[in-house]
Image: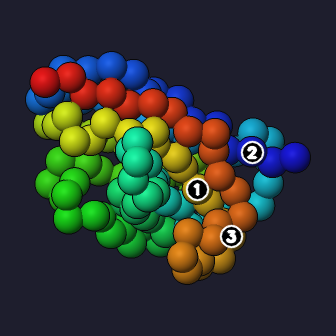
Amino acid sequence: QVRLVESGGGLVQAGGSLRLSCAASRSIFRINHWGWYRQAPGKQRELVARITSGGSTNYADSVKGRFTISGDNVKNTVSLQMNSLKPEDTAVYYCAGDRTAVVDQRYDYWGQGTQVTVSS
């Protein structure tokens, strides 16, 4: 079964940086639509950033200018560079991927999530 595997979460002080990465667990067709989402305790899962294989990106307003999503079409991976982290960025971060465009977070593939904790 195909899974997406995230790495790179952890504990960091406010103002610090982390880089999250996500890869498919085995070779599959190329994922053309990637997304990073996060879920904080007691809150709904929300979009952080998305990218297409053509390089089009969009970001949540709360992370614009601080986070950068990038994809590697050859390796079939996606990364999220997070700078100037704030305590409110604390959440479990999930990557998601699909061959075609999705709506309402209905991706075919999801990772297991990685915890990001930002201390003040």
Quarter of the rendering occupied by the C terminus: top left
Considering the numbered disc 2 on the image, is that residue within a helix, a strand or a loop? loop
- Marks 3 and 2 sit apart, C-alpha to C-alpha, by 14 Å
Tell me how the rendering is colored: rainbow
Q: Is residue 55 left or right of residue 86?
A: right
Labelled disc at residue 96:
1
Q: Earlier in the sequence, mark 3 or mark 2?
A: 2
Residue 26: percent from the left, percent from the top? Answer: 80, 42
Taking the spot 46% from the left edge, 43% from the top edge, the residue there is 93
- Is 55 rendered above or below residue 90? below
Taking the spot 22% from the left edge, 54% from the top edge, the residue there is 63
Labelled disc at residue 111:
none
Categorize mark 2 by other alpha carbons within 10 Å: few (<14), some (14-19), many (20+).
some
The answer to whether residue 70 is seen in the rendering is: no
The residue indicated by pointer 2 is 3
Q: Nearer the viewer, residue 50 or 119?
A: 119
Considering the numbered disc 1 on the image, is that residue within a helix, a strand or a loop? strand
Q: Are marks 3 and 2 in contact (CB under 8 Å)?
A: no
Q: Nearer the viewer, residue 116 or 68?
A: 116
Q: Amino acid at mark 2?
A: Arg
- Marks 1 and 2 sit apart, C-alpha to C-alpha, by 10 Å
Residue 30: percent from the left, percent from the top? Answer: 69, 61
Taking the spot 28% from the left edge, 64% from the top edge, the residue there is 60
The residue indicated by pointer 3 is 99
